[in-house]
Image (cartoon, rainbow, N blue to C red):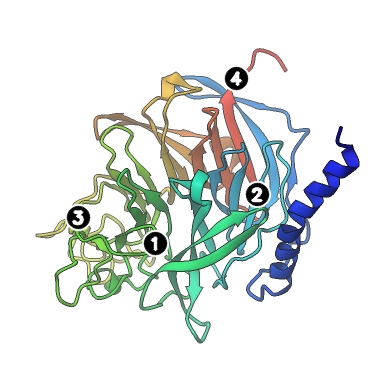
Amino acid sequence: MTSRSTVDSRLLRKRLPLVLLSMALAACDPGAPPPPTEPPRMVDDAKPQRAASEKVEFEVVERVAGLEHPWALAFLPDGGMLVTERAGRLRRINADGSVSAPIVGLPEMFVDGQAGLLDVVLSPTFADDKWVYFSFAEPNLRGNKAGTAVARGRLEGDALLNVEVIYRQEPKLSSGSHVGSRLVFDDAGHLFVTQGENRVAEAAQPLDKLQGKLVRIWPDGRIPDDNPFVKRAGARPEIWSYGHRNMQGAALHPVTRRLWTSEHGPMGGDELNIPQAGRNYGWPVVTFGKDYSGLPVSGSVGRTAPGMETPHHVWEVSPALSGMLFYSGKAFPEWKGNLFIGALAKSALIRLELDGDRIVHEERLLTDRAERIRDVREGPDGAIYVLTDEENGKLLRIQPRQADH
């Protein structure tokens, strides 16, 4: 019979290389952000807060607090999740709610304003390849400008190994704003990357620049042969659609399997789109919003123009749209097929009812919390998980209401 001490020794020998590797990576990671004053913590004494929508009663539970402007989350097969913090940290939240130290191995990032570490998704074949994909603001050589980039690394313990950048937005024009970004794999294995125009509005139209473009690549960064501009001279072959301002939400429709995106307008004019290959979505030539000065957007001709798409749905008063999901209905059958979108400026979770692709009703949830909603995802348990974009950012769980506590 094997003694417990023998088993522990074997486990230690097995894990020691990973532990040493993590320590070595942490020691030589010049791009790592400074540690927070207080690390994030599991909230183990939070009382569920009861609430109700027009369709169903529910409750909200705070699972984790102290995250520094969390941006995105991705569920792991073991019941935990990965969470990004905009300051440049990737953390693991375990199934019991405990929070890891920052995962090491990430590349250098440009962290300022809206820029930093952004979305995170698992490879569709994560169980076999362990690839984790993430988008971030990548600095130029001088370190004074940035562009959206996408990298992947193999998750081993609390380290990312073999990290490689598979996509770079060029040229780099951002001073810390309008970098997007969301990552979505479609059913054929393509990776869609949403971006912004780096607050250089005129860059959203030329096809030789990647600002204001939705791009589609293969998971290793190769360009699909059927991308719409592959054979056009002077055009970037990564481009799927163009004329976008700042796309911070994206999700696949559960029935049509087409990509939907949410997009910030300027002062007014937030958009929901279903981007089609090769189409021009207008910014800044057409927009439903105004410049922050209250004047018309420079270069705009109005709300429509020949050869440019009108939004699928528009908010003339900007909620500041962020992460989004189509809900499957596992825990809340009443919400099945609804589209949920985080709102930053209006501090709400927007619930949209659809008839086919048409938006027929809107309701705003969590408004009493007065917290910016950055990301929203459906968990394997059917609960809805929400990240609040605050200095003391939180992971919230929306679950069915219990009879008694």
Distance (Cα) linking label 4 and label 2: 27 Å
Where does label 2 land, which residue?
Answer: 92
Are there few (<14), some (14-19), or many (20+) residues within 10 Å of tag 1? some
Closer to the eye: label 3 or 4: 3
Are there few (<14), some (14-19), or many (20+) residues within 10 Å of tag 2? many
Q: Residue at x 78, y 61 (%)?
A: 37
Closer to the eye: label 2 or 3: 2
In the orientation shown, which residue stands out farthest toward the top?
A: 403
Among numbered discs 3 and 4, the one appearing first in the sequence: 3
Nearer to the camera, 96 or 251: 96
Among numbered discs 1 and 4, the one appearing first in the sequence: 1
Please identify the quadrant where the N terminus is shown: top right
Where does label 1 land, which residue?
Answer: 220
Q: Three-letter amino acid code at disc 2?
A: Arg
In the orientation shown, which residue stands out farthest toward the bottom?
A: 142
Task: State which quadrant residue 401 falls in.
Answer: top right
Where does label 4 land, which residue?
Answer: 401
Q: Three-letter amino acid code at disc 4?
A: Arg
